[in-house]
Image: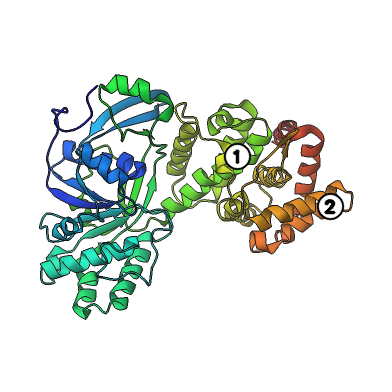
């Protein structure tokens, strides 16, 4: 069978190189590079992507063997109907191996056509490394590589403010654009670069914070034979992603002219403030993931899809989002409701196996940052406890007992967190403390929550009641009991 490259793929297009992309991984190719393809097809954007690697060279070599081409499968629900479609993406012009072709990287800095710089180097990628030097080929850190590139561009155009770049990081940290700019300026100072260069960074370049949202599982190892037969090419860089996507870019109004999104159908927004989008994503999507995990897993389920399609657990998740999470959010209720429906449709994606145990990593700190703020906001607004979120916390505490029936749960958390729960549960099982004592110990452990949750009126008693029911009848039956109580009160 033929290998995918421009010789074999006759519909290959060539575009000016407008984008430098730090990162060759599945997410950027299945998210950003796909959107560039759409812009090229539906607008006059007329641009391609040059990819450089933050780390090793293997994927750059594979990318160049395929002339930047790869197949993208988008699988998921459209209008509630499962859709599985694929296309070949040709928006990447080439990859530059920074370890063997650093001169090509410097040459790109002098390109008049280049305008955008995009990155996704993981949350740990935007860091300052004091051992990076300007003369390194390349620098170790991503911001070090970026600063060296920008300095080369500054020199190439004699500090012309019309040749700056629009820089859009996609790393999942808050204020990623602002943080990246701070690190770049720190390198400029560390390397004793010209004050004119620092002025040029401020005046000529725009650092935009952004929020990205699409599940991209990556290479389809379990179905690659079938997909290869379907496309008719051998493709080492095939990518699978979900249908849903959202990209929120915090940038100036002028960016809307440079990224002509109108009429493309892309769910990409240019806004003054992405905080509301980040808050709703963290509370609804990430919060629901964290909340459902102990409830669904202890009910005998293993994946997110199973959880939302299960009658009792699925109803619990939907009611928690609509009645306890959405009411704590600012913004248009209709928009929030539509977003929540999108999230639930994504959870039900039949093509993606998202295992609950993979979500369970560091569940305590996740609950603290994703769910606890919603719980506290609900109490502040309603002057009562959100019973489903409280039930989730009860299930989470029980989850950290480390047992699902006779099966041991492999807890994935900080060693001190696991040790704490092992200690209090052992004390409970040895009848040294009762259920209420256990709850009080957990809630008052400020290393877990950064506050004393036992001070929240009624929370200790509510958790104690739930915990005893879970222990006596199991999570699923306790969940039914919770639902029946809610119906009677309504």
Q: Give residue 331's position: percent from left, percent from top.
A: 45, 50
Query: Which of the two residues, 268 or 65, is positioned nearer the viewer here?
Result: 65
- The N terminus lies in quadrant: top left
Q: Is residue 143 above or below residue 388?
A: below
The mark lying in front, picked from 1 and 2, is 2
Q: Residue furthest front?
A: 100
- Whether residue 174 is visible here, answered yes or no, is yes
Q: Give residue 387's position: percent from left, percent from top.
A: 68, 44
Query: Which of the two residues, 14 or 445, is positioned nearer the viewer here?
Result: 14
State the residue position of label 1. Answer: 292
**Element at badge 1?**
helix
Q: Earlier in the sequence, mark 1 or mark 2?
A: 1
User: What is the CA distance from the residue labelled 1 to the residue labelled 2?
Assistant: 27 Å
- The C terminus lies in quadrant: top right
> Quadrant location of residue 35?
top left
Q: Is residue 155 above or below residue 341?
A: below
State the residue position of label 2. Answer: 427
| Left or right of 297, for residue 10 | left
């Amino acid at each position: 069978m033929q290998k995918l490259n421009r010789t074999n793929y006759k519909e290959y297009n060539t575009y000016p190189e407008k984008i430098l992309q730090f990162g060759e991984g599945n997410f950027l190719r299945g998210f950003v590079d796909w959107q560039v393809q759409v812009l090229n097809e539906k607008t006059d954007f007329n641009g391609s992507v040059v990819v450089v690697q933050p780390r090793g060279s293997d994927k750059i070599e594979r990318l160049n063997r395929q002339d930047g081409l790869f197949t993208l499968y988008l699988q998921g629900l459209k209008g509630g109907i499962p859709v599985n479609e694929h296309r070949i993406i040709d928006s990447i012009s080439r990859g530059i191996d920074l370890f063997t072709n650093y001169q090509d990287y410097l040459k790109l800095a002098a390109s008049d056509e280049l305008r955008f710089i995009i990155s996704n180097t993981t949350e740990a990628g935007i860091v300052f490394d004091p051992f990076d030097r300007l003369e390194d080929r390349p620098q170790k850190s991503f911001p070090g590589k970026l600063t060296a590139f920008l300095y080369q561009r500054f020199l190439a155009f004699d500090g012309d403010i019309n040749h700056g770049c629009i820089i859009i990081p996609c790393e999942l940290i808050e204020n990623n654009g602002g943080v990246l700019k701070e690190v770049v300026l720190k390198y400029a100072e560390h390397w004793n670069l010209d004050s004119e260069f620092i002025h040029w960074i401020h005046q000529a370049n725009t650092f935009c914070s952004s929020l990205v949202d699409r599940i991209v599982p990556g290479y389809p190892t379990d179905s690659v034979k079938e997909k290869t037969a379907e496309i008719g090419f051998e493709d080492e860089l095939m990518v699978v992603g979900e249908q849903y996507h959202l990209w929120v870019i915090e940038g100036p109004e002028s960016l809307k002219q440079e990224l002509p999104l109108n009429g493309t159908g892309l769910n990409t927004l240019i806004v003054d403030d992405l905080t509301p989008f980040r808050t709703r994503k963290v509370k609804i999507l990430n919060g629901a993931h964290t909340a459902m995990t102990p409830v669904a897993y202890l009910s005998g389920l293993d994946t997110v899809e199973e959880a939302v399609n299960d009658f009792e657990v699925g109803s619990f998740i939907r009611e928690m989002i609509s009645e306890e999470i959405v009411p704590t959010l600012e913004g248009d209720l209709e928009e929030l409701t539509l977003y929540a429906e999108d999230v639930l449709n994504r959870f039900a994606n039949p093509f993606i196996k998202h295992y609950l145990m993979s979500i369970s990593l560091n569940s305590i700190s996740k609950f603290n940052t994703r769910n606890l703020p919603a719980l506290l906001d609900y109490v502040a607004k309603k002057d009562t406890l959100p019973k489903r979120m409280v039930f989730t916390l009860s299930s989470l505490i029980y989850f950290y007992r480390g047992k699902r029936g006779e099966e041991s749960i492999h807890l994935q958390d900080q060693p001190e967190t696991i040790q704490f729960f092992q200690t209090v549960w052992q004390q409970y099982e040895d009848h040294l403390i009762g259920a209420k004592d256990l709850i009080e110990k957990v809630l008052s452990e400020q290393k877990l929550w950064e506050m004393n949750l036992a001070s929240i009126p009624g929370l200790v008693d509510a958790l104690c009641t739930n915990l005893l029911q879970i222990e006596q009848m199991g999570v699923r039956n306790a969940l039914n009991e919770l639902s029946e109580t809610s119906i009677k009160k309504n």
